[in-house]
Amino acid sequence: MTALIYCPFPDGESAESVGATLLDEGLIGCINIGAGIVSLFSWDGERGSGEETPALIKTDARLLERAMARLEALHPYDTPAIVGWPCQASKGTQEWLGGLEGEPE
Amino acid sequence: MTALIYCPFPDGESAESVGATLLDEGLIGCINIGAGIVSLFSWDGERGSGEETPALIKTDARLLERAMARLEALHPYDTPAIVGWPCQASKGTQEWLGGLEGEPE
Amino acid sequence: MTALIYCPFPDGESAESVGATLLDEGLIGCINIGAGIVSLFSWDGERGSGEETPALIKTDARLLERAMARLEALHPYDTPAIVGWPCQASKGTQEWLGGLEGEPE
């Protein structure tokens, strides 16, 4: 099984930088960084809004938890919103992401 | 567990308005409203296309069904396309969305 | 159950063309083609980056594997990145996508 992680960033630069580190560490196979989004949210009983940059990250299901934990540590926000879920995939995609090793912990 | 809901809107204004109501009612923690998309679809045996505004909505898995039903009622389309799925999440995200109560039904 | 498929394309034209064929063949109900994304990836031990066009495709869970296999065959890349996952859906969306037949194999 493969997996997707969805996580907004404050901007494209931080998404690229964190994505590059996760790629270096073999925890993900790809990060897709999207066009700007408008976010409305509630946090600690307060309402807020802002502009963010969305990222969709592809990995293998066996690395999902490790990749999300490392992403949380690298992310510029104190408490980034990170969600992830297992996915089926086409044959070629499974082979590609199935080859991810992740550096020894 | 947390959950994501994906739902296109006719425009950003309606996405923000419906998102604000769902936030007021404590059914979601955040709505991310994206840049315009092109949609090709088949509906009632007819083919169509149009421009829409995508929204990704974060909630807790416990509130997923309620949030989708309320979104369907609030949405400007008669039959909006609403899909949702449970997700794993980083520790901070689980605590944030786990605190959602949703107004008493 | 319904399902979503996520798959980047090299450009909007190829996304529309492949999406139209999948609609013709009754394998999907809708394709949402997004604004450009920046992709950073590792492939065959090499790092790369590029600009792509993201597509989110809605179908019924029963057709997910067939739709992904057909998408892989139609896609302009040799090895496209295709992931898909089952979803819950609002009542109207389930009825709409539940009506998809898919041409006889």
Image: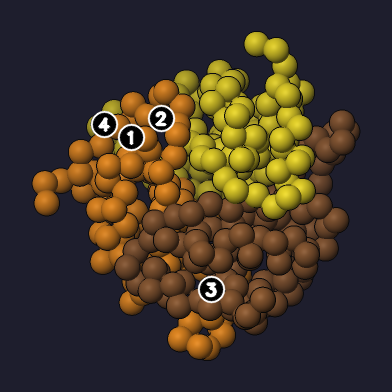
Chain colours: A yellow, B orange, C brown
Q: Position of residue B97 (x, y in %)?
A: 33, 34
Residue most toward the front?
Answer: C105
Mark 2 belongs to which subunit?
Answer: B
Q: Which mark is residue B97?
A: 1
Q: Which residue is mark 2?
A: B93
Residue C45 is left or right of residue A16, and the answer is right
Q: Position of residue C35 (x, y in %)?
A: 65, 58
Q: Which residue is mark 3?
A: C29
Q: Is residue C34 visible?
A: no
Residue B43 is left or right of residue A1, and the answer is left
Contact, CB < 8 Å: mark 4 with mark 1? yes
| Vertical order, C35 against C95 (above or below) | above
- Judge depth for marks 2 and 3 and give the one in front: 3
Mark 3 belongs to which subunit?
Answer: C
CA distance for labels 1 and 3: 31 Å
Q: Amino acid at mark 3?
A: Gly
The residue depicted at 48 percent of the width and 36 percent of the height is A83
Residue B47 is left or right of residue A89, and the answer is left
Q: Amino acid at mark 1?
A: Leu
CA distance for labels 2 and 1: 6 Å
